[in-house]
Image (cartoon, rainbow, N blue to C red):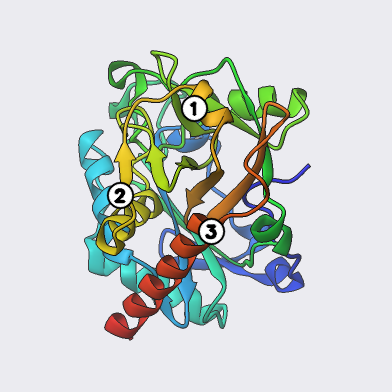
Amino acid sequence: MTTTHEADEDLRNQDILIYVNGELKPRAEATVSVYDSGFMLGDGMWEGMRLYDGVWAFFDEHMDRFFNSCKAVSLDVGMDKDGIAEAMRMTAEANNMHTDVHCRLMLTRGVKVKPFQHPSLSQSGPTLVIIMEHSKPVEKLSSQGIRLATVPQVRGLPMSQDAKFNSHSKLNCVIACLQAEQAGADEGLMLDPHGFVNTTNACNFFIVRRGEVWTSTGDYCMNGVTRQKVIDLCRADGIPVFEKNYSLYETYGADEAFLTGTFGAQTLVSEIDGKSIGNGEQPVTERIRALYKQAIADDIAANS
């Protein structure tokens, strides 16, 4: 079993310092209250970011998504973008981290005065946690790819819980992941409410057919930073790319398939529902990977 976030083991992660509301605490001591709204209800938002050569890749795009999500659910961040950047700088410096680092930035509505749902019960301000780990994807994610299984769990309509929220409430995706695991696959391929191919439980999903790159309409999936980068890079480089409805019929007949996410960038998909994808060659995916690596290098140069 392979996951899309499988990293090489790094013993340095046992001794990391974790940011908790302005303090840096050893991993074993970095805790939050059982009354915290994130623990109790999944009431919070998070971002995943990667550090390359001292620069957090596409930081502005991640912050735009983060602050927009928090505003949409009336969650007070308690600081501006520069404040977040400083907290991340402090955490990376304390851990002597410079590259191949993954950050999970988590904000909840904070500690509640009673163990109930109403947001007004969170009265002491938000809880901000920053976990940074030395993290490099295992080689087989790039070379072998992962196996997907189509699962019955779907990404729902915006008026139930909008999939664009990168929220702590991940049960929908956890169920999909369990269904895929029980089907003998690595990750679940989730459909949208109308039965069209949408996303996986952890990443956004693309196929390549006859030289064209296809992904979902974006109406029912996470508005991924890496997803949008891939779309923009394809357009700029003359690769035909379409955000559209398509079914499993087109998916099974794809020449290539890959996932996008901050951790794995572009992760190959080797099979879906037991059906091999393509002939083992990924010329378009490799071209996109090269463009994405250059985009990261350009971002580093612009922000160093």
**Marks 1 and 3: CB-CB under 8 Å?**
no
- First in sequence: mark 1 or mark 3? 1
Question: In the current view of this chain or complex, which residue is farthest to the front?
Answer: 210
Residue 260: where, in percent of width, then height? Answer: 48, 50
Residue 64, picture quadrant: bottom left
The residue shown at (62%, 66%) is 135
- First in sequence: mark 1 or mark 2? 2
Q: Nearer the viewer, residue 200 or 42?
A: 200
Q: Which amino acid, by three-letter code, is at mark 2?
A: Phe
Residue 263: where, in percent of width, then height? Answer: 53, 57
Q: Is residue 263 visible?
A: no
Provide the residue designation for mark 3: 283
Residue 95: where, in percent of width, then height? Answer: 57, 78
Provide the residue designation for mark 2: 66
Q: What SS does tag 2 mark?
A: helix
Query: Could you give the CA–CA distance between mark 3 and mark 2, rounded to whole angstroms?
Result: 34 Å
Residue 162: where, in percent of width, then height? Answer: 33, 26
**Marks 1 and 2: CB-CB under 8 Å?**
no
* Left or right of 121 on screen, residue 286: right
Provide the residue designation for mark 1: 250
Q: Is residue 269 visible?
A: yes
